Amino acid sequence: MNHPVPLPLEAPDTSFLTSGGAFVRRTVLPSGVRVLTEAMPGASSTSLGFWVGVGSRDERDGQYGSTHFLEHLLFKGTRTRSALDIAISFDSVGGEHNAATAKEYTCYYARVRDADVPMAVSVIGDMVTGSVLDDAAFDIERGVILEELAMAADDPADVAGEAFFAAAFDGHALGRPIGGTPESIRAVQRDEVLAHYREHYAPNGIVVTAAGAIDHDRFCELVEAVFQGAPNAAPLARRTPQPVADPAIPKLSVVHRPTEQVSMLRGSQGLDLRDERRPVLSVLNAVLGGGMSSRLFQEVRERRGLAYAVSSFAPAYLDNGAFGVYAGCAPDNVAGVVEIVDSEFRRMVDDGITSDELRRAKGQIEGALTLSLEDSDARMTRLGRSELGTGEFTDLATALERVDRVTTDDVLELARDLLTRPTITSVVGAVQQDELAAAIGIGG
């Protein structure tokens, strides 16, 4: 396979063999539920997930935090199972189950022995389709979520990350925190969360994926039983992009706290999921801050000793992304670390990367991609994100070939675009905004 496989919504059945010998099948059920499986030879366990194409960016006024709130509530009981029943179902077979809310999707997932797949599909399916959103559970879980937000608020790195995204996507739904704020969680009402549930958890908006020891036809039967009685429907259309305005000026956000260490993020808006330059970005990211041999790790930590942790990051969404650098350092070192980051940005813009750096980056990326797919969780996740995101499945061989095609000229061209964009800086720690702004030459 040397090209992505399209996953058109109107195609009821699709199947293909991956480069590693795994067999992928996709079936659209009459209810509009999309089922994707990847059979892994020799596996004796299965990872499965129920995906809903709704994330924090889809919330309206009065609903902020509802997607994450709903994720919690679905574990609290259905018409036929209590919260304890759900927990016992997985604990009694040594299985794992959990959920994750992101900016563009929610996933309820499990990993069990192959013999326990029917139980896992039944229980998670019941959670997704039959949650009662009990009043008492709602009030209790509100307190739990407030504790979770308080825990995140005590983590300077989390606070710096939220400040970075709020500034990078100012005025856009991508800039909102996934879990909401303490104020929005205290204010949101059960009726709003229930409306959010009924609007977004229709069968034709749900994707079910599985990887490992799995028989596709039998798995489809199990999933179809969950949605028995649902009316026939076409799959819900995929998300459409919503343009994000570029920041007009550099921005600096400082949250003063009496901490021993400062958390700092510096970067800009990046590339979206569909941008053909993402393989080039993966190389740029690896060279700049993607490992212990990266430029920033070597310069900031190994040569200067200015930080313990330093790395770069490049999350992507359907219509935009971000790129930046994280560092944790002493308050007196913040300006010095920013200076080094900017210097490395300029060096990459002026000179690009060397052929040796390109070779090492490709080896790092290709090795990490290959190793990640030894895990059924990663393959199950790849299926879900492919279906809900770009609408195409990218095989390992295709991904490796795309990375292998990257040249030093490609990286230089991308650097001259990406690393010259208006810079967003967020800092949490014992620093003053006006002093740091003067030191790094940026307005508050």
Image (cartoon, rainbow, N blue to C red):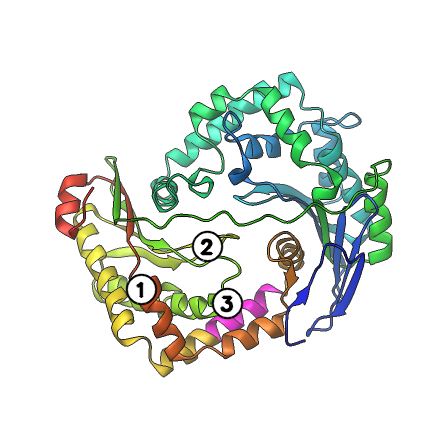
On the image, the x and y values in percent for residue 439 come to 13, 50
Highlighted magenta segment, given as a residue range: 363-373
Image mark for residue 24? none
Image mark for residue 297? 1
Q: Is residue 366 magenta?
A: yes
Dots 2, 1 in contact, CB < 8 A: no
Identify the residue at the far bottom of this view. 355
What residue is at 52 percent from the left and 38 percent from the top?
56
User: Which residue is under mark 3?
Assistant: 276
Q: Say if residue 408 shows up in the picture.
A: yes
Q: Quadrant of the N terminus?
A: bottom right
Given the image, on which type of amino acid does mark 3 rest?
A: Glu
Q: Is residue 418 magenta?
A: no
In the displayed structure image, the side of residue 432 where residue 63 appears, left or right: right
In the displayed structure image, the side of residue 287 where residue 199 appears, left or right: right
**Marks 1 and 3, how far apart in space?**
27 Å
User: Which residue is under mark 2?
Assistant: 315
**In front: label 2 or label 1:** 2
